[in-house]
Image (tube, rainbow, N blue to C red):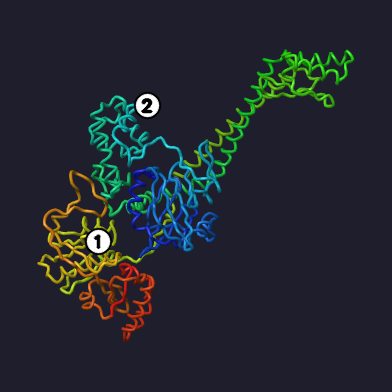
Amino acid sequence: MKKGEMSSLDLMAVINEIKELLTGAKLQKVYQSEKGEFYFYFYKQREYVLHIISGEMMHLTNYKKEFPQVPPHFCMFLRKYLKNAVLLKIVQPKSQRIAELHFKTSNEEPYILIFELFSKGNIVLCDSNHIIIQPLLFQKWASRTIKPKEKYIYPPTTTPDLRSLDEAKFIELMSKSEKADAVRFLAIDIGLGGVYSEFILSISGIDKYELPDKINKKTASKLYNELMKLVVKIATGDTEPNIIHSNGLPLFASPVYLGKTNLTEFNSFNDAVDEFFAKDEKTKENLEKTKKTNLRVNEYVKRYEEQKKTVEEYEKKSKVMKSEAELLMRNKFVIQNIISKILSSRKSGYSWEDILLRVKQEKEAGVDEAQIIKLIEPHLGKIIIDVEGKDHEFDLHDDVGYVINEKYEDSKKLEAKVEGAKSAMLETKTKIEQIKKEEESSPVKESSLKKIEKKTPARWYENYRWFISTDNYLVVSGKDASQNEILIRKYMELNDKVFHADIHGSPFTIVKSKEKKIPENTLKEAAIQTASYSKAWKEGLGNVDVYCVEPIQVKKSGPSGEYLARGSFMIHGKKNYFNNTVLEIAVGVLIKDSKYQIISGPYEAIKKHSRYFVRLSPGQQDAKILGSEVLTKLKLKVYGNDAGVLEMIKPSDIEPFIPGGSRLLS
């Protein structure tokens, strides 16, 4: 993605990475920066910060802006409704640039928070039926209205849903496209954006300037297949996140490899986007310049909008005046004749009663001129005449020609005002451009971005589940699909062993070999770790089969070139099974230099490396409740100077190490 241009594919990649991390997480805090950026602080075993710029982007971040002491109104509103709410799911409707976060509060109230990442953008809080409670911005278009109590309606879109686009529909869209070249067809009609469009055209061997309706069916089919490969890779999380550089500056953040060599790789696309927008020094400069320019031109922008509104009002009124004058001119003699007859009748001594009666009789007789007289008001000296279906009021003593001339003159006066207002608009626009040029040459101040303070693990494996075996081998398991992906791709080495439980919803576990043969006892402990942190624990099973394979047996590609979901791998060849592996872990505390570290793993391994531990097996007790009980048990075991260290531990420090519903073993 380019700066300020998060495509539907970029958003798909971001959501695919964060949905597992944040589903079930609790929203603890909401902040809004001076610039209007939003920061949502979630907690699920650890803290995650979701960064939102309405109309631009959404991603997890390690940075923040300074927050005002008094939060803006909408920020306070979100805190009121969503504080401590649990995130149930994140969805991207029909691959649009929209993210929906579904929440449930502590009193079971469901809410939907919608982020619009297109045009001017918006953030909209709705109830479970998509009825708007409060938007960040009130907006109105011909097809939808964003304001409280209205039904939230998705914006109309001409681009297809990439996740369900079939080949026939793709070829049909291409054949009917009116775009000047293939790259614009893909970028605009399909919604890929320029960089992805150029990439798939390049690998398909198609000139990007080729007319889309001139591409033959066979070539179009090849292009469709390359497009679907790109979409499937992103949708399944089979990504290679990176930032592409040009002349030392970040040019593009991509979730997949686009054939460029000058790039920096990242563990996740969220990390790549975060660094692309926040950490790079050039990006900081651009952010600061934009902020300064916006502050200076704000007054002129408001003036320009007011001038534009005035021009539109004058043009509208002028058009109405001119239209009315032309209408009356076409019917001048009929109108003048009606008024003249009435005045002549009065001069001849007819009373108003006689005249009204005569008009009524002529209406009944079908006289044309009588038919268009809607109302005569003698006491006001007024008459209302239907002129080509529109009622017009006339003074009985007015000259119709004079009335028409007045309307023409008023129209001309308004046209003159339009020209004057347009000149003022041009001056204002010139002033805005002048200020921008001045800002470009002004000195750059230090960025307002600040690193969010987090505990950084001293060793890479402390981001994962890990333990040291009784034989002193390092055993590491992924906590989720994203960690499984990174663990296998980045940290698995040739002589390691890889474990996975024979059940859907299992971590991948690697045993680091240290270039030696791994003892059987360590392999059994790795199997216990894998089984205990698999879905088998949450389902209350007592045991599950676990298999062990060599690293060369672990492949990313599925059958016939199919792509696998993020965190999933194909295992080729024979599996070495550890049948009926018992589910049981120990949670312990390592204490050194008056500092503590919570650890967990197989009982024998934790027993060897920790003085204070408890044993757990699958059960019915909730992890939050059990966290307090585990801490109490640990404190009863502690002695000497270690007692003071354990006082620093909180139940929430222990909860992430409990696999699910559990029970304490004696």
Sequence order check, earlier mark of 1 and 2: 2
Disc 2 element? loop
- Residue 536, numbered label: none
- Is 453 rendered above or below residue 401? below
- Residue 507, numbered label: 1
Mark 1–mark 2 Cα distance, whole angstroms, equals: 49 Å
Foreground of the two, 413 or 471: 471
Foreground of the two, 303 or 205: 205
- Is 90 rendered above or below residue 518? above
The image quarter in which residue 262 lies: top left
Residue indicated by mark 2: 178
* Residue 409 coordinates in the image, percent (x, y): 69, 22
* Residue 163 coordinates in the image, percent (x, y): 32, 42
The image quarter in which residue 376 lies: top right
Q: Are marks 1 and 2 in contact (CB under 8 Å)?
A: no
- Residue at horizontal 59 percent and vertical 38 percent from the top: 306
- Is 367 rendered above or below residue 183? above
Q: Amino acid at mark 2?
A: Glu
In the current view of this chain or complex, which residue is farthest to the bottom? 640
The quarter of the image holding the C terminus is bottom left
In the current view of this chain or complex, which residue is farthest to the front? 364
Q: Amino acid at mark 1?
A: Pro
Disc 1 element? loop
* Residue 480 coordinates in the image, percent (x, y): 29, 59
Q: How many marks?
A: 2
Q: Is residue 462 left or right of residue 281?
A: left
- Residue at horizontal 19 percent and vertical 44 percent from the top: 561
How dense is the environment of label 2, judged by Cα within 10 Å: few (below 14), some, or many (20 and up)?
some
